Image (cartoon, rainbow, N blue to C red):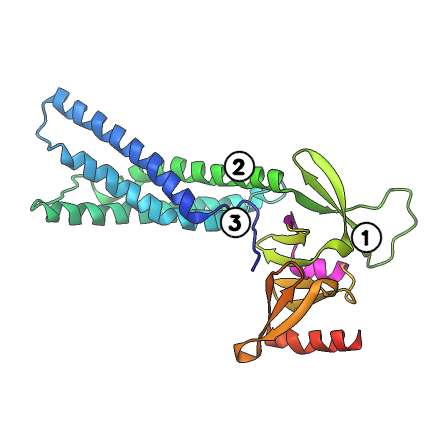
Amino acid sequence: MSSVSPGRWRLIPRLFLWAAVLLVMALANTAVEVMDVQRRGDALAAWEPLIWEISSVTVILLTLPLVWWGCRRWPLHEDTWKRRLPVYVLASIGWSLLHVLGMMALRKLAYLGVGASYVDGTGWASRLLYEYLKDVRVFFSFVALEHLMSWLVRRRQGEAHLFAAPEDAPPEAPVVRPQHFLVRKLGKEFLVATNDVEYAQASGNYVNLRVRGQDYPLRTTMAALSTRLDPALFMRCHRSWMVNRRHLRSIEPAEGGDAVLHMADGARVPCSRRQLHALRQVLGAG
């Protein structure tokens, strides 16, 4: 099935990229710590700061998908950031707590593996506060980078907007059926006919419009969009999907009473059992 979300680039390459970046930083921090220890004349094995750094990096990588998911689920926009900022602050506290508990557990296991005992001389309250003051900067750096990447991907991919009627147009009816969508892509604007939209998929605060092999994210909800499009042409087949009947080629029954819709471009769109009967009625009447 076709599914492209704004700002979502592939998870595995991203994790490998961040693993490489964080590993280099961990090795650099380890080297600095070892040099500081030698300069002070303290008794510290060279492998100990390496374990400290690697344990921290490991937990960060394991929890990064949670941060990315949160950014997609509650994106920050000009009209939402004030309302959602407290949510991100609370999330930073929870993320820091996971980070501290996870890396402490890994350090204890690593020390046991070499026949030693890991002892943190700092009290838990002081440790949590100290780590949070560092983690909050890391957390919001990841949030900022995720939103930046989301913006860059949308700019390259293109982003759709409902095409507004000119100011001197006659009064609009209570429900206005848009004839076009305005698509902005790489600084250029062009119109996409509503009838050319093959299907649509909900993705967080966006609905991806599929048009001639390209996905254009429209910032709206599926429920709001379905009230604006012509119900004789666009049919809701799933709570997250809507299809243009002109681009529907066949219906394949699936287990549990659901179905799979085969579209003209080869995509397979899910159809829920609840929507299947209504869809067949509409197609039969047409």
- Secondary element at tag 1: loop
Q: Nearer the viewer, mark 1 or mark 3?
A: 1
* Amino acid at dot 3: Arg
Rounded to the nearest angstrom, the CA distance separating label 2 from label 3 is 12 Å
The stretch in magenta equals 214-228
Residue linked to disc 2: 148
* Amino acid at dot 1: Gln
Between 211 and 119, the one nearer to me in the picture: 211
Above or below, comparing residue 283 to residue 109 in the picture: below
Crowd rating for badge 2 (residues with CA inside 10 Å; few <14, some 14–19, many 20+): few
* Amino acid at dot 2: Leu
Q: In the image, is residue 224 part of the stretch drawn in magenta? A: yes
Q: Position of residue 85 (x, y in %)?
A: 51, 43
Is residue 138 toward the left or the right of residue 217 in the image? left
Label total for image:
3
- Secondary element at tag 2: helix
Crowd rating for badge 1 (residues with CA inside 10 Å; few <14, some 14–19, many 20+): some
The image quadrant where one finds the N terminus is: bottom right
Is residue 111 toward the left or the right of residue 30 in the image? left
Q: Position of residue 237 (x, y in %)?
A: 65, 68
Q: Which mark, residue 179?
A: 1
